[in-house]
Image (tube, helix red, strand yellow):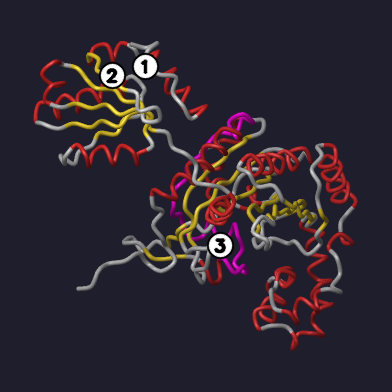
């Protein structure tokens, strides 16, 4: 048998790259926490009907891209292709609506779609998303947009563009759907094959076609903004005014429809030009009818999702790898010294220090070379002599200054050690041993 490899459309995220993921997750967690969003974790697979009812059977996601299978109980199961439907199912099933007020939730994790793999788009992909349930206030629309913008800017993305549109309510959308069909039908034979199929099933998706002739035909298509009711227009105008009040610039994009059937009113995408080519890094919108559609009470809602793979590609091209500081690298040689090194390293970890213990058993020279590459602030060295005396040789890696001290003293000087390490992390140098021991 040959070597087993990862399935097409999946990939390993190795430690060199994971540091970017950790930076993104930590940044999002901090910003969302400060805005009173609470994390929710839902199952990776759900009943297929959840997505057929929630996303829409006429969508590409349901029709072409879902990983669906029968389990051993002959139940139709689907790996989640997006996060919102599962969060809404949980909101209903667990009675979160009964708590009253507005529920601010966020999630992160893998999603699954059977698509042609390409850079930044895998069959197993990852998202961070938010859902605000229980508010029809335009301020909720603007809050989620502002938070997404804050996360992306904090991560270092500078040239961001916000595209916004309104899909109106269900009646507005139905009227616009018919107007679009009426406009496109005479051009049916000139549309690409996918758009011909969508003409009666999901005509709004034709506006998102990448086919050049279809795009050319769509240029003169009616605008959904001309089919909004007075209430829908009032809501959208308020959203735009609040964005202006916050200093968030935007561009109206009447062709922005998003790919899922549950969207109503505000739809938006945040696009980055940092790679020289446009890349959508965040997309979302309002979905006021979804909770009721899935069997819950009438509950307005809005949310977004950030695609992590595409965001990580951006960060890797824009930034150096985030630095991970290691406090101590422990080098030891000899049976007694190696046993003491293990104990000393564990005690330092319990005191809050990050410690890497060299487990190679190789000569000191090779261990010192690894210590140099580790990025550690200090190196702790134990040989036969140190083991016999219950001491340790502490060497600061930048200044090469070193001193032999007792292991007991080392463990008691935690406050001074932390100051020394913090000095290095902020300035790149240590202040020296003389004041410490």
Q: How many angstroms separate mark 1 from mark 3 (CA)?
A: 66 Å
**Which residue is labeled 3 in the image?**
52
Q: How many angstroms separate mark 1 from mark 2 (CA)?
A: 8 Å
Out of 171 and 12, give the one closest to the viewer. Answer: 12
Q: Report x, y in % for residue 74.
A: 36, 64
State which region is magenta.
32-61
Residue contact at pointers 1 and 3, CB within 8 angstroms: no
**Which residue is labeled 2 in the image?**
403
Vertical placement of 120 versus 336: above or below?
Answer: below
Residue contact at pointers 1 and 2, CB within 8 angstroms: yes
Question: Mark 1 or mark 3, which is nearer to you?
Answer: 1
Which residue appears at 77% of the width and 52% of the height? 265
Within-10-Å neighbours for mark 2: few <14, some 14–19, many 20+: few
60 falls in the magenta region: yes
**Which residue is labeled 1 in the image?**
433
Question: Mark 3 or mark 2, which is nearer to you?
Answer: 2
96 falls in the magenta region: no
């Amino acid at each position: 048998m040959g070597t087993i490899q990862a399935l097409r459309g999946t990939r390993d995220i190795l430690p060199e790259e994971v540091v970017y993921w950790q930076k993104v997750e930590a940044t999002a967690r901090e910003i969302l926490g400060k805005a009173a969003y609470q994390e929710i974790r839902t199952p990776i697979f759900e009943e297929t009907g959840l997505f057929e009812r929630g996303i829409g059977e006429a969508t590409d996601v349901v029709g072409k891209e879902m990983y669906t299978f029968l389990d051993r109980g002959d139940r139709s199961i689907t790996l989640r292709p997006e996060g919102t439907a599962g969060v809404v199912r949980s909101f209903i099933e667990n009675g979160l609506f009964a708590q009253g007020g507005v529920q601010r939730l966020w999630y992160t994790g893998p999603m699954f779609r059977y698509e042609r793999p390409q850079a930044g788009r895998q069959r197993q992909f990852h998202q961070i998303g938010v859902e605000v349930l229980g508010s029809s206030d335009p301020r909720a629309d603007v809050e989620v947009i502002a938070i997404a913008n804050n996360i992306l800017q904090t991560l270092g993305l500078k040239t961001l563009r916000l595209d916004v549109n309104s899909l109106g309510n269900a009646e507005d959308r139905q009227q616009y759907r018919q107007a679009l069909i009426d406009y496109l039908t005479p051009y049916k034979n000139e549309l690409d094959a996918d758009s011909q199929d969508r003409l009666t099933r999901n005509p709004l998706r034709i506006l998102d076609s990448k086919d050049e002739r279809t795009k050319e035909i769509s240029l003169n298509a009616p605008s959904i903004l001309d089919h909004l009711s007075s209430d829908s227009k009032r809501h959208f105008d308020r959203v735009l005014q609040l964005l202006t009040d916050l200093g968030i610039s935007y561009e109206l994009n009447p062709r922005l429809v998003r790919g899922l059937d549950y969207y109503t009113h505000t739809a938006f995408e945040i696009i980055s030009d940092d790679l020289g080519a446009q890349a959508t890094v965040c997309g979302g919108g309002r979905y006021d009818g979804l909770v009721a559609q899935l069997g819950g009470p009438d509950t307005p809602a809005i949310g977004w999702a950030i695609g992590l793979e595409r965001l990580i590609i951006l960060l890797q091209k824009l930034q150096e790898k985030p630095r991970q500081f290691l406090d101590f690298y422990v080098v030891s040689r000899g049976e007694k010294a190696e046993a003491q090194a293990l104990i000393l390293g564990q005690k330092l970890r319990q005191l809050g220090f990050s410690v890497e213990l060299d487990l190679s058993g190789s000569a000191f020279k090779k261990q010192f070379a690894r210590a140099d590459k580790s990025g550690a602030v200090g190196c702790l060295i134990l040989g036969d002599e140190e083991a016999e005396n219950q001491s340790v040789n502490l060497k600061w890696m930048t200044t090469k200054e070193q001193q032999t001290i007792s292991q007991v003293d080392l463990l008691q000087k935690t406050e001074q050690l932390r100051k020394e390490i913090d000095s290095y992390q902020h300035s790149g140098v240590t202040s020296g041993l003389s004041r410490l021991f």
